[in-house]
Amino acid sequence: MKNKIENVASLEDLQALYTETFGKNGTMTQKLKNMANLSNEERAVINAENTELRQLFRDKQNELEMAALNAKLATEKIDVTLDTEPKNRGTIHPLTQSAKEVKEIFESMGYTMMSGPEIEDDWHNFTALNTPEYHPARDMQDTFFLENGNVMRTQTSAVQIRAMEKNGAPIKMFTIGQCYRKELDATHSVMFGQIEGLYVDKIEKNINLSDLLGTMRTFALRFFGKEMEFRIRPSYFPFTEPSIEIDMKWGDKWMELLCGGMVHPNVLRNCNINPDEYQGFAFGFGWARLAMLKYGLNDIRAFTDGDIRWLKNSGF
Ligand code: DAH
């Protein structure tokens, strides 16, 4: 009997053998039933046999169950280190990535990010920026007008006005956003991003053009990761006096980096800030221009074409 149990190879066979032994008419069951007529010694032998056999069945059952479990684990094993099917992963758009970097740099210099609406009124987009109606400088920007007289904002400079109206001075803010002009060719797109900054403080602080240049050098060092060579040209904007443009040496070429200047006293006055007490600088860059320079991209229209193949190959 012991051998029989030992040689059983499956749980089903073990169950059958168990029934043969301990079932209603099982061999062991019979022996136990007939014990009444036996001597104490004989009973003791049968009891011992009963106990031993039950233990052997239990052990064998455990052994077979264990073997079954191990076999199952072996066949159902999952190799978690195996590569999965390649999936198309999204990438961060170069404009988004550059905006994030610009934001970090200006915030670390104490500038607060602000925003304004893309549909602007005439006051914020032009008049308060010292560009009243009939001012010839309005022609510098081909404007989309809405029927109610509002405009698609042509410049993020409008946010300077909103910021000063809201917070007064001193103020140190920047904004990153889209602007719109009726221009479309290889180097212009109807919608384009600008980055704008403004720093106005008490006149005693003597914020001046060299501070603007220093700020831009620091910005460029952080953004492009190396010291850049600059060139300053005089320029004209209604909202700054004097106005400048700053070029940056890029390879063997000079690239226009940004426009800026000292905030015109009329602009401060329009925001209820006294120009005898406060002065400061403002600046504006092309958002895509920055991203193109940094990441070596060359077609401004590609940024908004939404062609995923281009985005994939743009290094992101
Ligand atoms: N708003 C100007 C433009 O779109 C750029 C600009 C020039 C912004 C001078 C400024 C500034 O803040 O001071 O052409």
Image (cartoon, grey):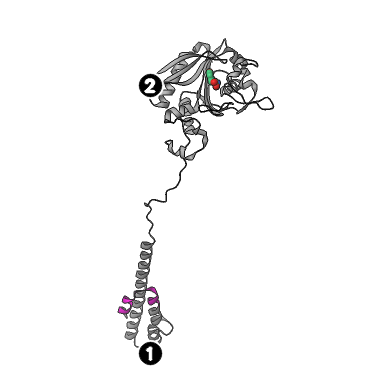
Look at the magenta stretch and give its main secondary structure.
Answer: helix
Residue beneath label 2, please?
A: 252
Q: What residue appears at the point 48 percent right and 20 percent down from the top-left corner?
A: 258
Kindly give the residue lying farthest to the front in the view shown. Answer: 185
Residue range of the region highlighted in magenta in the rendering: 3-15
Front disc: 1 or 2: 2
Q: Earlier in the sequence, mark 1 or mark 2?
A: 1
Q: Is residue 285 visible?
A: yes
Name of the residue lying farthest toward the left = 3
Q: Which mark is residue 37?
A: 1
Regarding mark 1 in the picture, which secondary structure is present there? helix
The quadrant of the rendered image in which ligand 1 is seen is top right
- Residue shown at the point (34%, 78%) measured from the top left: 53
Q: Nearer the viewer, residue 66 or 199?
A: 199
For badge 1, the amino acid type reads: Asn
Residue 178: x and y in percent read 55, 29
Looking at numbered disc 2 in the image, what kind of residue is underneath it? Asp
* Residue 10 within the magenta-colored segment of the rendering: yes
Left/right of residue 272 with respect to residue 204 in the rendered view: right
Q: Residue at x 39, y 82 (%)?
A: 20
Q: Residues within 10 Å of mark 1 (few under 14, many from 20)?
A: few
